[in-house]
Image (cartoon, rainbow, N blue to C red):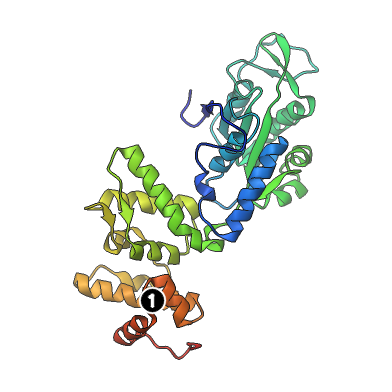
Amino acid sequence: MPEHLVLTTPRPGRFGRPSARAVELAGSSAVIGRVDELVRRVALLDGSVLVTARRGSDVESVAREIHARSARSALPFVSVPCGAPEIERALFGSPGSQSPPDLEALSADSRLAAARGGTLFLEDVTELPAGVQARLARLVRDGEAWIDGEPLPLGIRLIVSASASIDTEVRTHRFRSDIFRRVSALRIELPPLSERPEDVPALANRLLDEICAASGAGPRTFTQAALSLLGAMAWPGNLAELREVVERAAGAAGGDAIQVETLLPTLRFDRAPAAFTPIGTLREARQRFEHDYIAAVLEHHGWRMAEAARTLGIQRPNLYRKVRQLGIPLARSSE
């Protein structure tokens, strides 16, 4: 099986009790709590689902979470990226010529046939070519197919992902409205990390645990200062960008604890790139970092010292002392 096509059959379990919460849903913010509750409710309804998300979000983990919490949890979960090469062959296979004209034909080695009774996840569904969309619409409408010489029901639960612009794709006829109507009755919108910065430390810890386990390395942890730094970053690339940074930091760490100094070379500081040019001593570099980081945290909290001190994990008098030492102006402070 090509590496970009994934077929898994989860172990049986009680409905609503997946073995591990989807990484994209980690965290305790109110916004992700609402999404998690929606995922739980949608899983039990068993209809088709549309998940919209920004680039870099781990939508497949959410689709797997829906499947694991559903009555189909012991049945196949098949994941297909719609931008993959030879997508039509992957989805439909190479059926023989002897098939009735009123049914879409599949071969038994197709991803659609493999998903019978279970869940089919189509990643970036708007990337499907028009001809593939037409064949898929027919299957979704009929609910059965001609598979290697006989008509068989599919019984597939369809979960698809797309960007929020899918509505525009439908209006401009670049994506079929009949497929859209069927999959969008149940819709979940994943928030970007910029809307849930308080979840970033939990996400980073979860990713670090997974990366260390996958590599066979011993367990590692982030220091509190390192987690605060990660939580203050913008993450326009969402979970994929965070995962890349955590992977690099885990590989570069010299001990069990990942320090701020280990993180610095892995991060992009688009606000002030010149401030982090690799010149001067480590002490000077750390002072530059502390200046910009504390200023960024203060700005994030509207220059309210008490809230900034809590984020930084220090006492407010110590924050005032640091601000004076580093020459950070407090003219905009509300305290």
Q: Residue furthest bottom?
A: 331
Tell how many labels.
1
152 above or below 159?
above
- Location of mark 1 (residue): 294
x, y percentage for residue 52? Answer: 64, 49
In screen coordinates, is 13 left or right of 210?
right
- Which residue shows up at 75% across the image and 31% down it? 137
In screen coordinates, is 44 left or right of 10?
right
x, y percentage for residue 285? Answer: 25, 72
Most foreground residue, 166 or 30? 30
269 above or below 96?
below
- Visible residue check, residue 57: no
Most foreground residue, 153 or 35? 35
Q: Residue furthest right?
A: 102
- Which residue shows up at 58% across the image and 55% down it? 32
Please state which amino acid type lies under the numbered disc 1: Ile
- Which residue shows up at 66% across the image and 52% down it? 164
86 above or below 172?
above
Most foreground residue, 229 or 160? 229
x, y percentage for residue 316? Answer: 39, 81
Secondary structure under tag 1 reads: helix
283 above or below 159?
below
Quarter of the image for residue 73 reads top right
- Visible residue check, residue 78: yes
- Badge 1: residue crowd in 10 Å (few <14, some 14–19, many ≥20): many
Q: Residue furthest left?
A: 281
Most foreground residue, 107 or 76? 76
Q: Residue furthest front?
A: 14
x, y percentage for residue 320? Answer: 36, 85
